[in-house]
Amino acid sequence: MTETLHYRLPWQSSSVYPGAHPGQMVGAGQLFKRHEPLIASPDPRRIDLRASVLDPFSSYRVRVYQQQSSVNVYLLADLSASMGYADKQQTLIRFLLAAANSAFDYGDKFGFIGCTERIEQRWLLPAGQHLGRVSALAKQLERLKFTAGATGLQNASAFLPAERSLVFLLSDCHFPLAQLRAVLGSLQDHDLVPLVLWNRDEYAALPNWGLISFQDMESHASRTLFMRPSLRQKIVAAYRQRQHDLKHIFRAFGNEPLFITEGYNSQTVNRHLQQRAA
């Protein structure tokens, strides 16, 4: 069964299409927005007699309501080599299906942008409401062998719509911090939800003693180290410092990241989404 994501928006959508989120448009809704002259909103059923009597120009005033609107939801995914480590690939696919199904349940449109060194057409899914295309994309990702880097993330904003959208950024952020700043700078017009996907085995499961061979999944450079307690502590400390640096950069751009380190859990993601909208 596909998990459901309960996302709420801390801003008003400018979409003219009805949906489940607070919108800037007036129309059918329950939340009072303002009074307008009858000539501007010709619906006699909504005439407010009290407001009309108090109008200094003696014109009929009509109550208008805020329309609930839809939004575009995008998943911006890092498809670099390091995202193929352990269970990250399956987490990406699970989140893709969960985000798409949740968007459709809300009446929103869902799109996908997958990034390696560049952005390829096969990893582009324009925003729509076609579950079959999302399922086909998930099957493609299951067969994908993750290679190269993720510099294409810096160009992803060109494939997003002009209107403000909800964008989930799913990445392990194993690339230079300057690149991350460039990515976040290019996405400032949208509502970004960063999900940093790490695996604890990368650093917490290292032995205290022994020879360990490490290989960079993107450059394929390898190195053999004699593991000892002091070195293990340095590696763990480096990961903690990296997490601190990433949080600092995300927060500088007004985004609170969620670090997923112990496997994907929809409840954890939902808790994060509810906190950001509070």
Image (tube, rainbow, N blue to C red):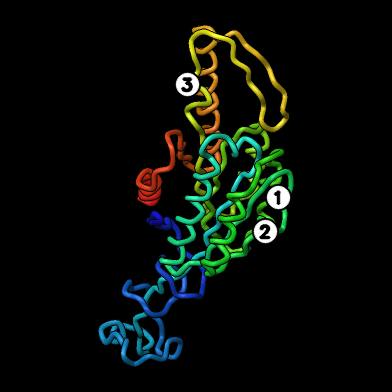
Q: Residue at x 49, y 75 (%)?
A: 17
Q: Quick one: label 3, few (<14), some, or many (20+) residues within 10 Å?
A: few
Question: What's the CA distance linking mark 3 and mark 1?
Answer: 35 Å
Residue with the mark numbered 3 = 205
Place of residue 251 in the rendered image (x, y in percent of width and height, measured from the top left)? 51, 38
Drawn side of residue 263 relative to residue 134, left or right: left
Eyeballing the image, is 97 above or below 86? below
2 or 3: mark nearer the eye: 3
Residue 82, by quadrant, is top right
Q: Mark on residue 155? A: 1
Residue 170, by quadrant, is top right
Q: Residue furthest front?
A: 143
Q: Residue at x 45, y 75 (%)?
A: 18
Residue 236 or 51: which is nearer the viewer?
A: 236
Q: Identity of the amino acid at label 2?
A: Phe
Place of residue 71 in the rendered image (x, y in percent of width and height, measured from the top left)? 50, 65
Residue with the mark numbered 2 = 159
3 or 1: mark nearer the eye: 3
Q: Mark on residue 63? A: none
Eyeballing the image, is 8 above or below 42? above
Q: Residue at x 73, y 29 (%)?
A: 219
Drawn side of residue 263 relative to residue 226, left or right: left
Q: Are marks 1 and 2 in contact (CB under 8 Å)?
A: yes
Residue 158, by quadrant, is bottom right
